[in-house]
Image (cartoon, rainbow, N blue to C red):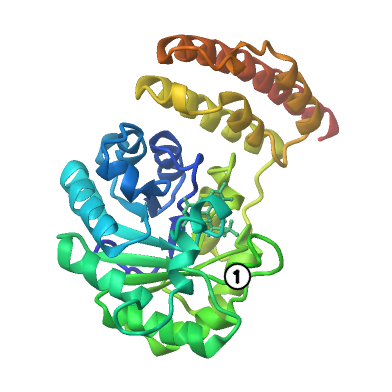
């Protein structure tokens, strides 16, 4: 098994997120308590054709165990990429996850992501036949991340067929493809799948804090809980959730302490982006702004960050030039965070 689900504590997974879960972000999330993380989706055709960016998305800092997610439109392409990627990234990489849920039109238009779930259920074309092929081609365990259909029975049939095809676990994002990211995730269907399947079931969608995690656990009894948007700019969420799981109550963290934790995460994130040559691939301004989410003065900080020099927008920059620019930008942004963290601490002390 790629992850020890027998532990008492429910597993907290970091969801695969394109342009978010790069190696540096995964590392920080892991430090804050994510039990398992996934790469951004790696396009099988791109990887098979030698796209160097796939390498940038695929590695893991300090050999932290993680999963590689592949998006593709055919059993052949995904299987070939799976074999290549596991070879490249073992032993830290532990599992290949097949993306069956991405609803974004540029992805589905080419038959990838959620389009795999739109295949008919005839034997040759069945979505689960892809899982079977990848299981045959890969040494690693294989998992699938699905969305749901409007029809619960059909979703259940798909989940069972994925299990029968040899998947080691399944992640269920409780939204249909048409819902994209709107509406409320349906956790009941994950509960039904959990009851019917023997492999671990990981619930995904709308877990954002201790309360939603507890409700999801009570309702579904799943083996793992995967969190996406709630962690963007906020890997500290994993620490809070783990503290809650351990103590059974909300931890009271003062705002200045939380502010400092966030600044410390951003600082470490920027250092790792530089150290591992990821700066040319990451929009430092946008990512830093995510770290202001939910903090006092977040609007003021975002405005200040926006006002910083804009040279990074120049498209003709080489990777080296982008690195220099973005590193400098990162320093300036950290100064803004530190300034407001001090302000927060001061105001908090005055109040207490
Ligand atoms: C910016 C962004 C990028 C995403 N990229 C991927 C991806 O590469 N692969 C994938 O399976 N899902 C991707 N997703 C979907 C998430 O993994 C997750 O299923 C979804 O956000 C619901 O979980 P949440 O409510 O915790 O955010 C992405 C979501 C977001 C917001």
Q: Residue at label 1?
A: 175
Left or right: where does residue 252 sit relative to residue 143?
right
Horizontally, residue 341 falls left or right of residue 347, namely: left
> Any atom of ligand 1 within 8 Å of the CB at mark 1?
yes
Q: Residue at x 24, y 54 (%)?
A: 82
Secondary structure category for the residue under label 1? loop
Q: Is residue 206 left or right of residue 279?
A: right
Position in image of residue 307 (x %, y %): 75, 16
Which of these two is toward me, 271 or 325? 325
**Quadrant in the rendering for residue 310:** top right
Vertical relation: 107 (above or below) 278: below
Name the residue at 58% across, 82% down.
188
Visible residue check, residue 168: no
Report the quarter where the C terminus lies: top right
Tell me the quadrant of the picture where the N terminus can be found: bottom left
User: Of 291 and 142, which appears nearest the observer?
Assistant: 142
**Residue 222 makes an appearance in the image:** yes
Say which of 44 and 345 sits in front.
44
Residue at horizontal 41%, vertical 89%? 196
Q: Residue 254: horizontal and vertical position, in percent? A: 69, 41
Counting other residues with Cα less than 10 Å from the Cα at mark 1, is it few (<14), some (14-19), or many (20 or more)? many
Up/down of 302 relative to 97, above or below: above
**Total numbered labels placed on residues in the image:** 1
- Residue at 62% in and 13% down: 332
**Residue 24 x, y percent position in the rendering:** 41, 34
Q: Quadrant of residue 56?
A: top left
């Amino acid at each position: 098994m790629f992850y020890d689900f027998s532990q008492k504590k429910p597993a907290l997974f970091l969801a695969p997120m394109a342009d978010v879960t790069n190696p540096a972000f995964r590392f920080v999330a892991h430090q804050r308590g994510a039990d398992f993380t996934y790469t951004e989706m790696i396009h099988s055709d791109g990887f098979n054709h030698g796209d160097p960016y796939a390498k940038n998305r695929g590695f893991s800092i300090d050999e932290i165990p993680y999963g590689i997610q592949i998006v593709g439109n055919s059993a052949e392409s995904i299987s070939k990429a799976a074999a290549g990627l596991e070879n490249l990234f073992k032993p830290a990489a532990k599992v290949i996850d097949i993306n069956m849920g991405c609803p974004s039109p540029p992805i589905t238009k080419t038959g990838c992501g959620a389009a795999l779930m739109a295949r008919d259920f005839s034997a040759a074309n069945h979505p689960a036949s892809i899982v079977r092929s990848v299981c045959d081609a890969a040494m690693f365990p294989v998992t699938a991340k699905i969305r749901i259909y409007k029809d619960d029975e059909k979703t259940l049939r798909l989940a069972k067929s994925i299990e029968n095809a040899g998947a080691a676990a399944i992640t269920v994002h409780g939204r249909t493809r048409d819902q994209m990211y709107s509406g409320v995730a349906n956790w009941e269907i994950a509960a039904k799948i959990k009851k019917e399947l023997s492999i671990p079931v990981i619930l995904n969608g709308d877990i954002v804090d201790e309360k939603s995690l507890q409700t999801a656990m009570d309702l579904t009894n799943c083996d793992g809980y995967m969190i996406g948007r709630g962690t963007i700019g906020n890997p500290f969420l994993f620490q809070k959730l783990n503290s809650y799981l351990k103590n059974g109550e909300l931890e009271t963290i003062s705002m200045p302490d939380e502010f400092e934790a966030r600044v410390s995460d951003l600082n470490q994130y920027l250092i790792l982006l530089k150290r591992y040559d990821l700066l040319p691939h990451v929009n430092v301004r946008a990512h830093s702004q995510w770290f202001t989410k939910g903090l006092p003065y977040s609007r003021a900080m975002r405005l200040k960050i926006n006002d910083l020099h804009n040279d990074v927008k120049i498209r003709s920059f080489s990777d080296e030039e982008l690195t220099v620019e973005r590193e400098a930008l990162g320093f300036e942004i950290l100064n803004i965070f530190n300034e407001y963290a001090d302000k927060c601490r001061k105001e908090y002390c005055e109040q207490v």
